Image (cartoon, rainbow, N blue to C red):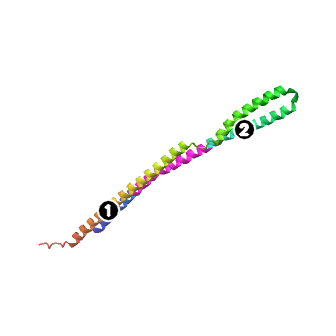
Amino acid sequence: MRDLRAARDDLERRVHDLKLTRQVTMQSLPSIRLVQENDKSLVTKINSTLVNTVPLWETQLAQAVTIQRSTEAAQAVREANDLTNELLEKNATNLRASNRIVREEMERGVFDIEAVKRANAELVATIEDSLAIADEGRLRRAKAEEEMIKMEAELRDTLAAASARTPRPQT
């Protein structure tokens, strides 16, 4: 009978440990999902940057070639000074406008500081949430451990009391 009780108690402890392990595993699932979503977002942002940057480079290269050809054409066609001067003025105006746009974009950061601040705040909140969850889990495990110690002591006392009883003689 004592062996059966001991086996039962071992089984109950194992079941409790498995339930605790399951809970801890379930807590890790959202963090894994969060990391996966963050990685996916980063890949999307990198792809978006490449898709937007390469065409800009092509446009700038085409514009540089166009400006160079315009300059060469202006030098080759000195007799048509008026037309050349008009083209040069227009190209200069376009270059200035285009240069302003390009320079403003070049000087702009890849990320806006407000977005970085919000992302940082979210990250800090996520870490604080994770720490709070971990603290709660630690407290629950400690309470469960205390309860298990009490239950174990109660069981020992009961077993000791059962062992101390002497069987009554039958008449």
Residue 80 visible somewhere in the drawing: yes
* Residue situated furthest left in the rendering: 171
Q: Compared to 5, does 128 lie above or below? A: above
Quadrant that contains the C terminus: bottom left
- Residue 41 in the magenta stretch? The answer is yes
Residue type, label 1: Glu
Give the residue pinned by disc 1.
146
Q: Identify the mark at residue 110; answer none if there is no mark.
A: none
Measured as percent of width and height from the top left, residue 62 is found at 75, 36
- First of labels 2, 1 by sequence position: 2
Q: Quadrant of residue 95?
A: top right
Does residue 60 sit above or below 132 in this rendering? above
| 14 within the magenta span | no
13 displayed left or right of 37: left
- 29 horizontally vs 170: left or right: right
Residue in the foreground of this view, choosing between 61 and 6: 61
Q: Nearer the viewer, residue 87 or 35?
A: 87
Seen from the viewer's position, the closer of residues 2 and 70 is: 70
Is 128 situated above or below 11? above
Horizontal and vertical percent for residue 120?
Answer: 51, 48
Q: Which quarter of the image is occupied by the N terminus?
A: bottom left
The label shown at residue 60 is 2
Residue 65 occupies which quadrant of the picture? top right
Q: Amino acid at mark 2?
A: Gln
Residue at 67 percent across and 39 percent down: it is 103
> In this picture, which residue range is highlighted in magenta?
20-46
What residue is at 68 percent from the left and 41 percent from the top? 54
Q: Is residue 6 above or below residue 91?
A: below
Q: Secondary structure at mark 2?
A: helix
